[in-house]
Image (tube, rainbow, N blue to C red):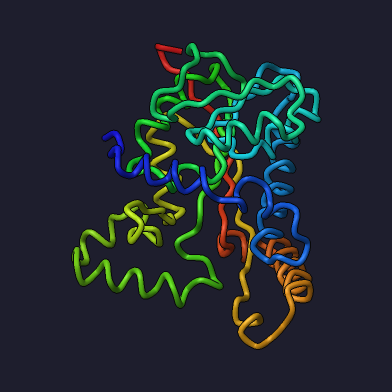
Amino acid sequence: MAESTGQKEGVREFFNTSRGWKGDFYREPDDPFGQLLVRRKRHVMEVFRRHVDPLGGPIFDAGCGPGEYVAEVGRTGASVFGMDASEEMVRTASNNGTGGSSIVRGDIEHIPFLPGRFTAVLCIGVLGYLESDRTALGEIRRLLKPGGHLLVNVRNLNALTSFHYTGRLKLRYLKSMGWRALRSAVSLPTHGERRGWKSRAYNLGKFERVIGEAGFEKVEGLTFGYELKILSLLGVGGTTRVRIESWLDSLMMNLPLGIGRYTGWGYIGLFRKIPDHRG
């Protein structure tokens, strides 16, 4: 099901007016959330370099925001195209050191490129702003060459350090929708509803199954990010909190047997397009 105009317009307006998402988040070394995004970019690029040949064909960033990933992928020598629904994000990305990369405005449910155009598609922090993922995943699959890669990021509904918050979300959803709906939900709305739009966090096991049903096979999955907001409440400065959260991030990602692999704030998954009779 395509998302409503109200949701799309609300999200577009939010990103049109957000200075943080235009790039400020990435430039503040003592901002815990900004540094969480910096670590996200590092982890995404590590997965990209492990599995994607940057010279194997053009790369597409669906929902490119201020162009952070367009620029980073471009530094690998890849030919990169970016798209965003926000006019301001397109303008910012076009002036954000993206070199000769092509940045266009567009809708992820109606992407203006021919089938089989790209060897890889990045979709970082985008799906949570849609009302349904099905159409967007179909469009991404259409764009990919057979065997091409989807590199996706969403928020984890069951993140260890967000359990107190997401636990309340689940209780409210249970009261309004019932146990059966809660048990089957792939994602739950988190915040934004008061502004006329919403964002979502995902049950990662169910999310990976949705990706599989859309015609992809999983190559790699991991989580990162442990927000210790209580430290700020206790008066701990931003620089110190960033150091502690970065240390905890590294610790949890390197626990033996993958014990902490799916406990972080953000999920990064790499999937390969499964060819079928249509290509």
Q: Quadrant of the N terminus?
A: top left
Percent across and percent down for residue 93 are 65, 33
What residue is drawn where x is 70% and y is 49%?
43
In this view of the protein, which residue sits in the foreground, 159 or 88? 88
Percent across and percent down for residue 17 are 52, 48
State whether residue 267 is above or below residue 247: above
- Residue extending furthest toward the front: 17
Q: Quadrant of residue 234?
A: bottom right
What residue is drawn where x is 78% and y is 76%?
240
In this view of the protein, which residue sits in the foreground, 132 or 144? 132
Percent across and percent down for residue 6 are 30, 43
What residue is drawn where x is 61% and y is 59%?
261
In the rendered structure, the answer to whether residue 62 lies left or right of residue 92 reads: left
Percent across and percent down for residue 82 are 60, 27
Q: Quadrant of residue 174?
A: bottom left
In this view of the protein, which residue sits in the foreground, 10 or 141? 10
What residue is drawn where x is 30% and y is 73%?
171
State whether residue 272 is above or below residue 154: above
State whether residue 189 is above or below residue 248: above
Q: Quadrant of residue 263?
A: bottom right
